Amino acid sequence: MMETDTCFTEVDLKPEKFEDIREEVEKFFCMLCDKEMVHKIALVLLEGLSTACVDNTTGDIFKSSGTVASDIRKKMLEYLTVRCQSFIAETLILGGRPEDELSDQPSDIISDMIEDFTGLKRNLLTKVSGWLLSELREDRIDDFVQEMELNSFWLLNRRENIARNLLMVVDSMNEYHCNMKFKSEAELEQHRLQCGSRTLLCENEGCTAAYSAANAEKHDLICPFKRLPCEQKCSEILIRQEMDKHCITVCPMKLVNCPFYSIGCKATVPKCNIKQHFSDDVRPHLRLALIYLHKGASTENLRSRAERIELVSCLRISSLILALMCLNSKVDMKPNVYVSSSLEFCVDEQEGIMSYIRTKLVSAVMYIMVMHEHEHEHEHA
């Protein structure tokens, strides 16, 4: 039966200071640690304990991971204490990090120490079989981690307390903790208000991240809940984690292919500007449509066809304008404005007329293409 966390007394893991004792008493140490690194080491401790317990009991019909957890945890912390003392001695002698430490990450250093410990706890079966490389082993380790968390066997805050002490030992370059000293408690408290290792909570709505002040800018660059203007310059303001979905789905500035792409227009334009693209490129679209419909026709023949289509459109609009002028004279409306209740639109001077013509030409091109596709399908049927 797995014991609860409350019945276990942690091994004291405080970094040793080889300094004059009287001078030590007179000093006030900051000792604030990087929140994220502390949490990472706390996870490493639980995973290491789970690994040692699983490897120690696999194939044993008299023991289970839960029955040996308390004893192995105690031995693991004792082992880490000895290794940390050795680490301090080597650091002082060499004047820096031991040469055999390949990583400068405290969590990796602690992980390597725990891996050495788990190697000592493997039983004969796990040493001679292919157990260490099996997926079943990884599954059992993960399952036992979850079991310990559900049973509150080794609470996170207790693991983090140990992790802080371990961090201050192996972080010989003081990259993840503050080792500043002060003569008075007042000076210490004043420093902690501005210390780069103090813990901050993200202010973005929905984010629960905690990090050291020194990493505030780094977190701000990756926080999934930070509100940002659309990357494609539309008017929306949205959180970072929704940016990609917005940009590739509903953003009006999303680049799309021209509807005439299949017949030769290779333009890519913002989705909201597609109508303007139609209006601006009526003649090129008309030419491409005719080339598509009349393959093999001469350039002169295609130009003639395009001119006829444009002429028909102009004649139709001219007839419409004349009819509206007559209506205008009958109802005594203001000059230069033509109204049709049936069409429900107004045309203002030449600019409005040309805009309407361009719209009609676009419709003509689309109609030609649809009819051609319909005929093509009918022939195959």
Image (spheres, helix red, strand yellow):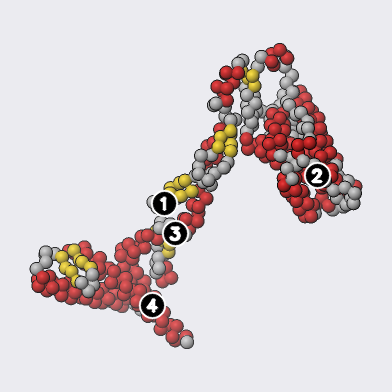
* Mark 4 closeness class: few <14, some 14–19, many ≥20 residues within 10 Å: few
Name the amino acid type tagged 3.
Val
Image location (x, y in percent) of residue 222: 54, 44
**What residue sits 29% from the left and 69% below the top?**
359
In the rendered structure, are the residues bearing label 1 and label 4 in contact, judged by CB atoms less than 8 Å apart? Answer: no
**Badge number at residue 250:** 3
Mark 2, residue position: 2
Q: Secondary structure at mark 3?
A: loop
Q: Is residue 184 above or below residue 296?
A: above
Name the amino acid type tagged 2.
Met
Q: Secondary structure at mark 2?
A: loop
Q: Quick check: can you spot residue 314?
A: no
Spatial CA span between label 2 and label 3: 53 Å
**What residue sits 64% from the left and 31% below the top?**
33
Spatial CA span between label 1 and label 2: 53 Å
Spatial CA span between label 4 and label 3: 27 Å
Depth-wise, is mark 4 or mark 2 nearer the camera?
2
Q: Secondary structure at mark 4?
A: helix
Residue in front for this viewpoint, 144 or 316:
144
- Which residue is most to the top? 22
